[in-house]
Image (cartoon, rainbow, N blue to C red):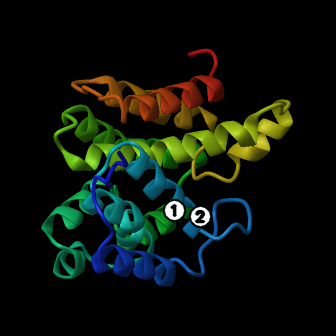
Amino acid sequence: MSETPKWQTSEKFYAAFRKACEGHKLEVRKGGDIPYIGHLLGVASAVIEAGGCEDQAIAAFLHDIVEDIGVSVAEIEVEFGKTVAEIVDACTDATKEEKELEAGLRESLSEEEYAKHWWKNRKQPYIEKIKNKTMVDPSVLVALADKTYNAENTAADLRGKNDDEREEVWSKFNVGEKFQRKWYHGLLEAFKENKSYDKFSQPLFNRFEAAVNEIFPNKK
């Protein structure tokens, strides 16, 4: 007896994919020329494979659109509903406008000063929000899929590299290895806290943990 899908794609799903493709069409992944839509497809695929619902998959397509393109959460709610909008909002640690202001600030600060600002004002609050949520919150799975995709890509970029080559990899990010370590270890602890993964989502968490441990094999 054949199984039926947990859910079937609706016009809203296709509309979200089109919006993501159009919104991010000029964007590339950090340090290369790979179209950014590849990241969004990867995150959406991970969400679906981990048992996510259609709204979570739609939010995966749109999770960077407030931060990178400047679409508002209110616009997303009108077009895709409250649940999708809330997930996207939860996955956003800064709006496009806030990131532009931060870019200007970066020019006036030392590398260490900027990294501390980045950590205190954006990343540490984001980690605390994740830590205080359970898997009942639909944004957690989308965030986990996003961070897993990023961590696995970084692990692959660093694999087999010497110290100079590792430094070159880290140079494409806003902050260097020291604060990236704080970020990823903070995320790992947050994704452990108060979380009960099921047989679908547990493998995704395991992938994230393995990638973080590969990137930073020894805590310092």
| Position in image of residue 193 (x %, y %) | 27, 24
Calculate the distance from the C-alpha at mark 1 to the C-alpha at mark 2: 5 Å
**Along the line of sight, which residue is nearer the eye, 71 or 87?**
87
Q: Secondary structure at mark 2?
A: helix
Residue count near mark 2 (Cα–Cα under 10 Å), binned few <14, some 14–19, many ≥20: few
In the picture of the structure, the residue carrying the numbered disc 2 is 38
In the picture of the structure, the residue carrying the numbered disc 1 is 41
Q: Residue furthest front?
A: 1
Q: Residue at x 19, y 36 (%)?
A: 133
Residue 75 figure quarter: bottom left
Q: Residue at x 85, y 36 (%)?
A: 164
| Position in image of residue 5 (x %, y %) | 33, 55
Rendered view: 172 above or below 20: above
- The image quadrant where one finds the N terminus is top left
Q: Secondary structure at mark 1?
A: helix
Residue count near mark 1 (Cα–Cα under 10 Å), binned few <14, some 14–19, many ≥20: some
Would residue 121 be visible to someone looking at this image? no
